[in-house]
Image (cartoon, rainbow, N blue to C red):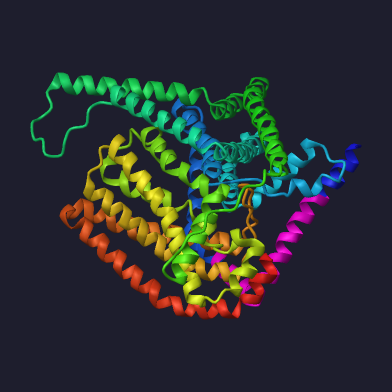
Amino acid sequence: MALGSRLVVFRALLAAHAQTSWNRSAREMGRQGVVLMITLTCLVGLLGVGPLFLGLGALGWMLGGTLQKPLAVGFLGLVLALIGLGGGLFGGVLGGARQLNWEAYRGFPLKLRTLYFAELVAGLGDPLPLLLGAGLAAFVTGLAIGSPALLPLLPLILVETLFTLLALQLLVGGLAAALVKRLRLALTLLIMLAWVGSTLATSQLPHRAKAHETTPVAAPQRAERNARIEAMTRRGLAILSALPSHAAAESLARVREGRWASAFALHAYPLAVLALLMLLGARVVARESRDERTVEAPRGPDRLWTFQGPAEGIGRLHFRTLMASQLGRFAFLMPVMTLVLLKGPFAQMRGQSLWAVPAAFAYLSLVGNNVMLNQFGLDRHGVKALLLLPVTAEDLLKGKLLGMAAHQGLQALLLALLLAVFERATLAPLLAGVLMLGCVFLAQGCVGQWTSLWAPRPMAMNSLKNSNMPFAVGMLSLATSGLWTGLFGGAFALCAWLAPAWLVPLMALLFGLTLLAHLALLPTAAAYLDRRREILVERLG
């Protein structure tokens, strides 16, 4: 296919994807949805995104004028690594997956690289890459203002970092989809990784003094501790200097010195890493799309089961649906990934005993957002039979909530066991953490009941592929997740600091109040479900 033809197909592919997503979102939302989308966008911009962009721009401006110092170059490389590598890993772990339906384009003479590049650009529609990409643009703009001489090289750094984020997110998402099919192996490998990290952290980190110890540290012990800290700092700087982002930062320092040839030569390493990520990602995603076409062998009839009431029956059905989906199985990798983060990148942060438990449960609460905000998505055409059952709308919503509660409760139990074994967490903070997770679950579940009826969309059972979440729902997910985790996590941390004995009673009280509020709003959500039955059948059936 000629270059011109490839460009035409490439642009048509992106335009078709964007137009389809926009048309679907517009039909689902209507005039009220558009108003809400604009309102949410403005609120998120004023409260969170605006200060973030201004802060990154100011940071770039300060670093642009001090690149002659080695510390500034190292810090610049760290910022680029956090945006590119950190953002890609975080997005992939949270379920960042492919946007385009590759199977639908198999009838066209499209090469793998054409589809893959279209997929990368379409990935900018996800909230996380969109926010990080805009923040990166603000940071690069600040660098240009702080040092105008860097301007010719800054577009290359912007493209490198942004495409590294997108390629790594797609690669990690594809690997996660492959690991979900081998859940036992994935859990075993991640637990072994957490154990290795725990062992290394115990052997290398200086021993923390207990809070009740009042004996002053002797001078030789203080000197030994400082020496260990300096040694760890040197190792950290050595690791940072090996990253491709450090080579990109070093190239800007070479530009300040007028060494243009050396500056461009340094970009061979980041570009090679980016090419490797893209090659691996294309192969993984192509294999995933081939596996989706594989027809499973027929199974025998499932064993029948009983239940006490309609809500319990719907809850058991929804729990089985979640456990049969790749998205539901992927959620059980998150407790182990949370432990790996605590034992790896965050092991050296101070005050971990105070924030580790609430942070772990808050991170776990983010996993269920895709299902929580689209509670009928996995039912797909089965929603027709579901709505024909002699079950009230209130029992239907209660059952969905019970199924998701059982699903996330098992994840919370796994996380609590891992924290007890590897972090030596005691019973009181673990119980308070589970209660905090329950508060976030109930609050987000109330929001999810409305978004599930307002903008329903089908979700794949055998894939982690992105389900084209409307932009307004994505912004609402970010805003409400931050609100609930900040509210309940802040109450947890504040009480653990000021009155540890009241931690469990306080979280139990908050859980009870959140449950009462959820039940009070349930009849209104049930009435909305009765009005949206035809929309559910049209969108999902």
In this picture, residue 56 sits left or right of residue 520:
right
Residue depicted at 73% across the width and 44% down the height = 293
In this picture, residue 59 sits left or right of residue 34:
left
Q: Is residue 72 above or below residue 391?
A: above
Whether residue 38 can be seen here: no
Tell me the quadrant of the picture where the N terminus can be found: top right
Q: Quadrant of residue 18?
A: bottom right
Residue depicted at 57% across the width and 73% down the height = 389
- Residue 469 highlighted magenta (yes or no): no
State the image coordinates of residue 296 (x, y, percent, origin top left): 67, 44
Q: Nearer the viewer, residue 306 or 33?
A: 306
Q: Main secondary structure of the magenta part?
A: helix
Q: Is residue 129 above or below residue 276?
A: below
Toward the left, the furthest residue is: 215
Q: Nearer the viewer, residue 85 or 357?
A: 357
Q: Is residue 73 above or below residue 316?
A: above
Residue depicted at 39% across the width and 74% down the height = 519
In this picture, residue 109 sits left or right of residue 359:
right
Q: Is residue 187 above or below residue 23?
A: above
Q: Quadrant of residue 356?
A: top left
Q: Nearer the viewer, residue 183 or 163?
A: 183
Whether residue 86 can be seen here: yes
State the image coordinates of residue 222 (x, y, percent, origin top left): 18, 23
- Residue 25 highlighted magenta (yes or no): yes
Tell me the quadrant of the picture where the C terminus can be found: bottom right
In this picture, residue 319 sits left or right of residue 437:
right
Residue depicted at 48% across the width and 36% down the height = 184
State the image coordinates of residue 170 (x, y, percent, origin top left): 63, 40
The boundaries of the magenta stretch are 12-41
Q: Nearer the viewer, residue 416 or 225?
A: 416
State the image coordinates of residue 302 (x, y, percent, origin top left): 56, 53
